[in-house]
Amino acid sequence: MPKQGDVYKRLARHLDDLPAGFPPSKSGVELRILKKLFTEDEAEVALYLTLLPESPESVARRAGLSAAETAGKLEEMASKGLVYRLEDEKNGLRYSANQFVIGIWEFQVARLKPDLIRDMEEYLPTLMADSPWKTTPQLRTVPVMESLPVRHEIAAHENVEELLRGHDRFLVAPCICRRERAMVGRGCGKPEETCLVMGRAVDYYEKNGMGRVIGREEALAILRTAGEAGLVLQPSNAKKIANICMCCGCCCGVLRTIKSHPRPAEFVSSAFRASLNEETCSDCGTCLERCPMDALTRTDGGGIRLDPNRCIGCGLCVLTCPTGSLTLVRKPESEQRDVPTTLRKTYIDMARRRGGGKFFKLVRSWLRSAVRV
């Protein structure tokens, strides 16, 4: 296994070539993070993985290691959340690269330490500033169901309960964002066990001890707590989803970052936004505490003002408006983003929009990996 240059710098470049990116910071904090997560040997092995799952034998041939040694290293790395593991009767054990976000970082939920959290907090502005989130986010925002009036025609991929009913395996995991903030004394007290995982990903989470397996009815019940708890529903940005995050504006790294921008609506994929009837508004102010983006404010002369450029269409304000003055309306077609059918298409779109050869590197790696069996 050849070693040329600083392996952590090479790993950082390798992760940055993946669709979600891993941009360099001025301080080099991203390298500190990698050194805390990967040993040098693990970093070397990670360089040979792509987003296409492969057998240990295939990875071993490229890495110049024995199949047995490679299998052991890959399994150890998978148990740490550094690479992804898939297993089925037809193909056996296979492994693939994890993107840093969403991926490696979220899989550290049971391995967090205060110094690692501080490093991530320092890195987050760089990660989000240079990420493809504004053009192709990895998550999208869907309204809590109770906020949508019956008159709306809701597409299947906009109905969070229907998205969930399309699966038969479920797991609930802790929210890494709320856990991070709680560990450094900045928690909000909102429910932590809320991240829903579906389908084949359940195996990975369960084997790594990152959550507990639940049934469909409990998963639906957890979803229905979002409105009361003031949590934003964010499923995968695809019509066929793998997870649903339930996020708060005070802890979620993504929501906190986009909230700092003057027009958060530009960063989210959402088909809806709030509408305010100022004539019937009683100026009670309940909505001011519910909105995670500060889209609703009280004017100097009294009265509530809605800034549509800050609204992400979560519906939380609608649920508790006592006069029904707040409603959700569908955005014009020109303002709605296309939702990819699968996560693979989402990643291809992310790589294409990032430019710099990222798309061609992604496709080339998939094509090369497809014949390395």
Image (cartoon, grey):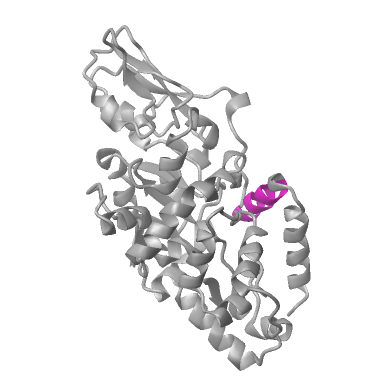
Q: Name the residue nearer the viewer: 301 or 284.
A: 301
How many numbered discs sit on the rendered protein? 0
In the shown orientation, is residue 288 left or right of residue 235?
A: left
Question: Relative to 279, does residue 69 appear above or below in the rendering?
Answer: below
Question: Relative to 363, does residue 310 appear above or below in the rendering?
Answer: above
Q: Where residue 11 sits in the image (x, y, percent)?
A: 62, 69
In the shown orientation, is residue 225 left or right of residue 241?
A: left
Q: Name the residue nearer the viewer: 368 or 18.
A: 18
Residue drawn at (58%, 75%) of the image: 43
Question: Relative to 152, does residue 179 appear above or below in the rendering?
Answer: below
Q: Is residue 239 shown to the viewer in this render?
A: yes
In the shown orientation, is residue 62 left or right of residue 9?
A: right
Q: Which residues are magenta?
A: 343-352
Q: Is residue 193 shown to the viewer in this render?
A: no
Return the residue found at the far front: 27
Q: Is residue 199 magenta?
A: no
Q: Where residue 298 sits in the image (x, y, percent)?
A: 29, 17
Residue drawn at (36%, 28%) of the image: 294
Name the image quarter holding the N terminus. Answer: bottom right
Q: Where residue 331 sits in the image (x, y, percent)?
A: 53, 24
Q: Main secondary structure of the magenta part?
A: helix
Q: Where residue 89 sits in the image (x, y, percent)?
A: 57, 80
Q: Is residue 348 magenta?
A: yes
Name the image quarter holding the C terminus. Answer: bottom right
* Picture quadrant of residue 322: top left
